[in-house]
Image (cartoon, rainbow, N blue to C red):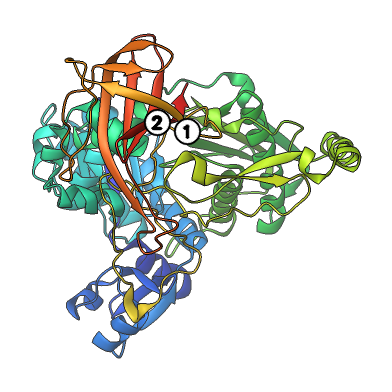
Amino acid sequence: MSRTLLVWCPDWPVVAAEIVDGVSAQGAVVVLHANRVVACSEAARAEGIRRGLRRREAQSRCPQLVVVEHDPGRDARAFEPVVAAVEEVAAGVEVVRPGVCAVAARGPARYFGGEEAAAERVVEQVAQACGVESQAGIADGVFAAGLAARAGQIVADGRTPEFLAGVTVEALERPALTDLLRRLGVTTLGEFAKLPRSDVLSRFGFDGALAHRLAAGLDHRALAVRTPPRDLEVSGEYDEPLERVDVAAFAGRALAERLHELLASYGLACTRLGIEAVTADGQELHRVWRHDGLLTAAAIAERVRWQLDGWLTGARRGTAARPTAGLVRLRLVPGGVIVHLGLQPGLWGDAGAERERAHRALSRVQGLLGPESVVTAVVGGGRSADDQIRFVPWGDERVPARPAAAAPQPVPMKVVALEEPEPEDGARPPEKGPPWPGRLPAPAPALVPEQPMPALVLDAAGEPVGVSARLELTGKPAVLLLDGPVEIVGWAGPWPVDERWWAPGESRRRARFQIAVADGRAFLMSLTAGHWAIEAIYD
């Protein structure tokens, strides 16, 4: 794991509002997004204001509070001079997000005579050039360096896991995962890191596995990252120099769309974006943006616009940070390129003549054979694979039979009923669907039969396996009787599901299992009133 020097500017949205809008950061100031506090000044914290508070609660604690709306573009423009200041003493700066940037620590440490001297020099440079308070931290990987910067520490080489062991799980910044870990008794990153990797992946999914790597001191950027080939870069040259932000942003958006289409054609996505520009008099500008997830077309265009705005307007205190002339060349270089299987286009493309021809052909088939002859599947909410799919005639509105949750949460399958905490003011966000506790987690089965297939599970003594009221098995599953006896090589469960118990005609109570057999097949099985059945088949 490479040594990383990370620079963190505390309360950056507040500082950016002071730099760009002239709001005094010495007073009680909060930055709001979606009516909640996302950042606050030191004076506001002294009044008891914290991140996550609603606007009304924050103003009740401090009536003289100054409220500023969250503006990512403002934060990015104001941060550009800070990045430029860091770049004057350390090459290869990566912007993690506005207010945070990182650089490989090896070069500055060797040049300035040690990691501590390098960190002090970077902080001093930011203060002298921009008049901005910052803290630096050094550790193995970006995640650990970020925590070290907040504590103002330099973690010794190879001691990162020990440093992370005592940090609480809230540092992962994954509220759903954090809440579940605490309910399971896991309160620190060290305790989380001790869990087996395979168990974490099967229980918490891919995002949980990434969080587990971070807790163990392993930066997840090392996963499947390769150096992009030269032909993935896109560039544009302009006869008329780009001097206005709106004109440059329009040109940058066209390049961003070209880059995203090029990556998508190879089934790739990037996690870093290099933005390079050349002015009319030969001045070269370069910046690297880093993102925690995959950069979409909109995210690429947004970062290009932020960067061009920062270059062309300049937000450094007391000095002009503008280029010496208009921009005549732009180039976008993808970094951290990884394979992204989710970029596969639709069967006939997402738009264009091919999709129109397919629509006319399928509509004619419906005219000959009836509307139900051509259907498409719509994924909705539900706890079982057969509940989540609804077939809709081609051309009809694709509305799920049951509302689905906005995003999958790591909810334990063993929970039969779970009450979500009521938000303040008693109002639930209207855009979020039901959480569906106990629903089937990813990966989804490949085949769902129209009717469950009867089967029988036996233990080693040849007796049918059952489940007691306390969810205890009467025996260990050993043999599956389907077309014939097949040895069971792995199983998980039982996971109880008790649905619609208040409606006697619609209630359904069963225990579900995942079972793998010796011939390589895997099944989702259920036990209802003593009868075994196969609900779905995994690929």
Quadrant in the rendering for residue 292 = top left
Location of residue 148 (image quadrant): top left
149 in relation to 74, above or below: above
> Can see residue 360?
yes
Compare residues 535 and 279 and report the one nearer the observer: 535
* Drawn side of residue 189 relative to residue 445, left or right: left
Please, which residue is most extreme toward the bottom here?
Answer: 63
| Residue type pointed to by label 1 | Pro
Question: Which mark identifies residue 497?
Answer: none
Judge the density around disc 2: few (<14), some (14-19), many (≥20) Cα neighbours within 10 Å: many
The residue under label 1 is 452
Q: Secondary structure at mark 2?
A: strand
For the point 31% across and 86% down, the residue is 59
Q: Which residue is disc 2 drawn over?
A: 533
Q: Quadrant of residue 202?
A: top left
User: What residue lies at 16% left-to-right and 32% top-to-bottom?
Assistant: 195
Give the image location of residue 423, x and y in percent.
33, 72
Q: Nearer the viewer, residue 64 or 471?
A: 471
Residue at image coords 28%, 80%:
28
Residue 116 in picture, x, y percent from top left:
15, 39
| CB contact under 8 Å: marks 2 and 1 | yes
188 to the left or right of 519: left
Mark-to-mark CA distance, 2 and 1: 6 Å
Question: Residue 227 versus residue 316: which sits nearer the camera?
Answer: 227
Q: Position of residue 340 (x, y in %)?
A: 52, 29
Pointer 1 local density, CA inside 10 Å: few below 14, some 14–19, many at least 20: some
Q: Residue at x 45, y 20 (%)?
A: 226
Is residue 223 in sight in this rendering? Answer: no
Q: Secondary structure at mark 1?
A: loop
